[in-house]
Amino acid sequence: MDGIEGRRSSEARPIATRIVATLGPASESPEVVSKLILGGVTVFRLNFSHGEFASHAARLQTVRNVAHRLGRPTAVMGDLQGPKIRVGKVSAAGVTLEPGLDVVIRAGLSEACIERGVVVLPTTYPEMIGEVAPGQRVLINDGSIRMLAVESDSQRGELRCRVIVGGLVTSGKGINLPESEIKAPAITARDWTCVEWAVENGLDFLALSFVREASEVHELKERLAGMCSVRHDVDRSGWAAMIPVISKIEKPQAVVNLDEIVQASDAVMVARGDLGVEMDIAKVPIVQHRILAACAQWGKPCIVATQMLETMTQNASPTRAEASDVANAIFDGADAVMLSGETAVGRHPILVVDTMRRIIESAEDQVVSEARDAKPPSRMIEQRYRTAALAHGAWYLAKDVGAAAIVCWSESGGSARYLSQTGFRVPIVAYSSNARSTRRMGLLRGVTAVESKPPPTGRLGDWATTVERDLLARGWVKPGDAVILLAGKPLGVPKVVDSMSVMTIGDPHSGFRS
């Protein structure tokens, strides 16, 4: 497709793939947050597994203040911990588990001990004693310690395991039970407290951990709808009505129920950390590819996360494999890539974002040069969504006229989402008078959000004139370029987009202006 793709303009074309960065001690200062936003971060993550609400509130306020000063709509995601099973208290030195020996996990134990030469460990989830059957795997510390259950004694509250691969166990290490049917709810009491805090503080997204089936997503959405209704935040829009839910795929059960989970979710995260522990690590790349394909079919944003540039937590450059990993996620259609410890506690948070952005730029240039045709979301078209159909039509129209940009008025973000998922290789500019919507567009591939009031006249022609002026100022278009416009009347009202037109830059009679 001709247009802005092949040139660098007076204002550099922003990368299409979004960068999500986790906030932490290494990145919480206003100075670092400012540089991360300017470096390409459009979504920040608060990890509720660590820290207190006071520290999260301070980081949230820092992002809001810096983003406002920079004029860059920037979203903040809260990541719920979920039912993470952990080892209980162990002495400071830890305890070493030797291969071939037995280990007992005991309910109600306050601290690890050794009885008659056998290591006995406490757990934060005593119910596992009755939910793990003999022959099933019990993994500790992201699978670095591997055991098999050999006997379960519910009366004594003990699970006896045999160590296959040993190692040092310290307090709080995670326990994974990939073959067991765990009855723990996906949303814990602690999580519900975090959800309430997220609503009260106006977070832009909530990530739901350890999803197993779509009903868990619906449960969170129903509770959120009630909370937002009480706070009078409900309007006619989709994302703007309540906090969107991002389902984290990190359990084998979620892969089995993938299609239903994607349909129920507002976005999806490929959480490769626990996913790589819960299933054969050799299958993780295949599952990642499958998840990205499912999200593309449903038109749902997809984030690829965990260890993307892990080496840069300590080092000033990534490995070649990590660079390839990021690029391949983009080739597969990821809407966003996420940094975790690299920005939260790493030594080079600014450099790692700069490195991520440069890898993305190179990968996206390759995608553009190959001129591959995108595939509009088939499931959304099948369900006859009006705005999705308009976005589908805009894709073909933009291809036929060689459009330099796609512009929409997207009050609640719906039109921007559909356009993003259609796979345009030219800039998508989305106008909205809703600050919350413009922040949340930070998760949408290829979308530049502009917070703006509708023209006083309410005329689409006056808005089109503003669009032309903005695009020329950015250097994204030149006289004679074609631009696709999507809007509806009245501007500023959700769910009224029903018109599409072609505007020629420099022609006062084209598009909505005639």
Image: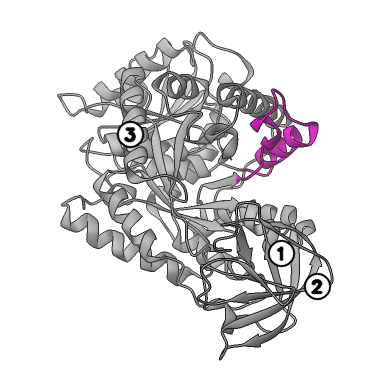
Residue 177, compared with residue 405, is above or below; it is: below
Q: Say how many tags the image has.
A: 3
Q: Is residue 151 visible?
A: yes
Q: Judging from the image, what secondary structure is the residue with disc 3 in? A: helix
Reading the chain from its start, which is encountered first: label 3 or label 1? 3
User: How far across and how far down the image is residue 219, in percent?
Assistant: 37, 68
Quadrant of the rendered image containing residue 31: top left
Q: Position of residue 259 (x, y in %)?
A: 56, 65
Q: Secondary structure at mark 2?
A: loop
Secondary structure beneath disc 1? loop
Q: Which mark is residue 101?
A: 2
Q: Are marks 3 and 1 in contact (CB under 8 Å)?
A: no
The residue located at (49%, 29%) in the rendering is 41
- On screen, residue 253 versus residue 167, left or right, reads left
Look at the image and tell me in which quarter the C terminus lies: top left
Give the amino acid at mark 1: Met
Q: Which residue is mark 3?
A: 58
Between 501 and 155, the residue placed more toward the observer is 155
**Label 1 crowd (10 A; few <14 / some 14-19 / many >=20):** some
Per the model, the C-alpha gap separating discs 2 and 1 is: 24 Å
> Going 56% across and 54% down the picture, which residue do you hit?
295
Residue at image location 54% in from the left, 69% down from the top: 212
Question: Which segment did they paint magenta?
Answer: 305-333
Residue flagged by tag 3: what amino acid is it? Ala
Q: Does residue 231 appear to the left or right of 117 in the view shown?
A: left
Which amino acid, by three-letter code, is at mark 2?
A: Leu
Work out whether mark 2 precedes mark 1 in sequence or the reverse, and give the earlier one: 2
In the figure, 109 relative to 392: above or below? below
Disc assigned to residue 279 = 1
Q: Closer to the observer: label 2 or label 3?
A: 2
* Place of residue 440 in the rendered image (x, y in percent of width and height, measured from the top left): 38, 40
